[in-house]
Amino acid sequence: MQKKKIPFSPPDISAKEIEEVTDTLKSGWITTGPKVCLFEQKIAEYCNTKNAICLYSATAGLEILLRLLEIKEGDEIITTPYTFAATANVILHTGAKVVFADIHKGGFNINPSEIDNKITEKTKAVITVDFAGCPVEYDKIIQVLEESKQKYNPAANTMQTLLDRPFLISDAAHSFGSSYKGKMVGGIADFTVFSFHAVKNLTTAEGGAITFTNFESAISEEISRNLKLLSLHGQSKDAFSKMKAGGWQYEIVTDGYKYNMTDISAAIGLGQLSRYENELLPKRKAIYEKYVSELSSEQRFILPPFSENDIRYNFHLFPLRIKGISEEQRNEIIKSAAEEGIALNVHFIPLPMHPLYKQLGYKISNYPNAYETFKQEISLPIYTKLSLEDVSRVCDFLKKAIH
Ligand SMILES: *Cc1c(COP(=O)(O)O)cnc(C)c1O
């Protein structure tokens, strides 16, 4: 008999999201409009920021941020090798150089002292990644950036005179709902980008948002306006205002992109957000804790190191590692799990291992911690509709697989 399939990360869509989307479809306005506006307000409220700007994806958010910050050829941006391609590909688009700083030994997140080693007078920004939803050491990283002021040449770029140091951009594609030392992710780094892609904790099918902090309020308003311009062809009016009777006039003030979020997506997001704290996060937590209790008896399993006091974790992934395993053995386990109907995954293949980055001259041997973590890593299914019995089935499979 074919065993029941356990997928990796299907979305959790309830009557609430369906109702919101139906309401939008019937409203006569389906692209960027009142639902996006409301979703932006709710995100800002949740993250404790003044503004949020919704977009078609997190990648789109990173693209317009780098444009806003005037990043160009000759500049350098430091980021982690242990991430999805989106984080670094957007840097390549600007012509700036990608500078990788390795992760902590035995961990997942970028090491602040590695960032320190890599800062030069050309460094314009650092893009960190809250791997699996676990916040990076934001205070240490901001301190490194503050202390780099001597090396730094603010006159090179007008945006950078605002803070007089390289910007901190947080790729928080995984960490919506996590917090660090009492502050919600979104309200810590200078700029934060969330993803609402279908596999993330909170989804709009495709979608993303930018939040920002650390700027005085007049500047904040200007940043918000400029990001909106960049997301929609540099048009002085959004489509919703333009469609109102008599509102036909507009001006193009910059060569912006077409990255806006639709009201249909925002409707899904509003439904998800209304269930996030009270339903979706507690369900993820219960699954996570079940994994911990079933797997902790086995010496060879390295459980995720996310239980530090300073952190509220959003249980986005369960990145298990297996001691002493080779890359080939790990791949074999994933293959035999698939034969049992269990979908396992790996986060991430370090960027220097991909053909594109190899061609650009990056070598994985320069990032030994990223490689060591990668070869031991298996991400286990974690999603709200996963039953605790199925969690046990995954654990039983893994225990057998390592013997
Ligand atoms: C998913 C993901 C992205 C990209 O998000 P999109 O919304 O699909 O553009 C970026 N960075 C990381 C770390 C991700 O996991």
Image: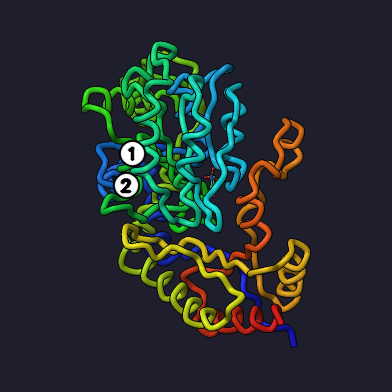
* Label 2 CA crowd tier, 10 Å (few <14, some 14–19, many 20+): many
Q: Quadrant of the N terminus?
A: bottom right
* Label 1 CA crowd tier, 10 Å (few <14, some 14–19, many 20+): many
Snapshot quadrant of residue 86? top right
Kindly identify the residue that appears in the image at 78 percent across and 63 percent down: 328
Between 55 and 82, the residue placed more toward the observer is 82
Residue 14 visible, this orientation = yes
Image location (x, y in percent) of residue 204: 46, 51
Image location (x, y in percent) of residue 31: 44, 39
| Residue 144: mark in rendering | none
- Identify the element where label 2 is drawn: helix
Image location (x, y in percent) of residue 18: 43, 60
Residue 35 visible, this orientation = no
**Amino acid tagged 2:** Ile
User: Taking 285 as reference, is 118 left or right?
Assistant: right
Residue at the extreme bottom: 1
Between 96 and 201, the residue placed more toward the observer is 96
Snapshot quadrant of residue 106? bottom right
Kindly identify the residue that appears in the image at 43 percent across and 69 percent down: 284
Distance between the Cα atoms at labels 1 and 2?
Answer: 6 Å
Residue at the extreme top: 155
| Residue 43: mark in rendering | 2
Q: Earlier in the sequence, mark 1 or mark 2?
A: 2
**Amino acid tagged 1:** Ala
Between 67 and 131, the residue placed more toward the observer is 131
Q: Is mark 2 within 8 Å of ligand 1?
A: no
Snapshot quadrant of residue 295? bottom right
Q: Answer whether labels 1 and 2 touch (C-beta < 8 Å).
A: yes
Between 327 and 95, the residue placed more toward the observer is 327
| Residue 52: mark in rendering | 1
User: Taking 400 as reference, is 70 left or right?
Assistant: left
Image location (x, y in percent) of residue 346: 64, 59
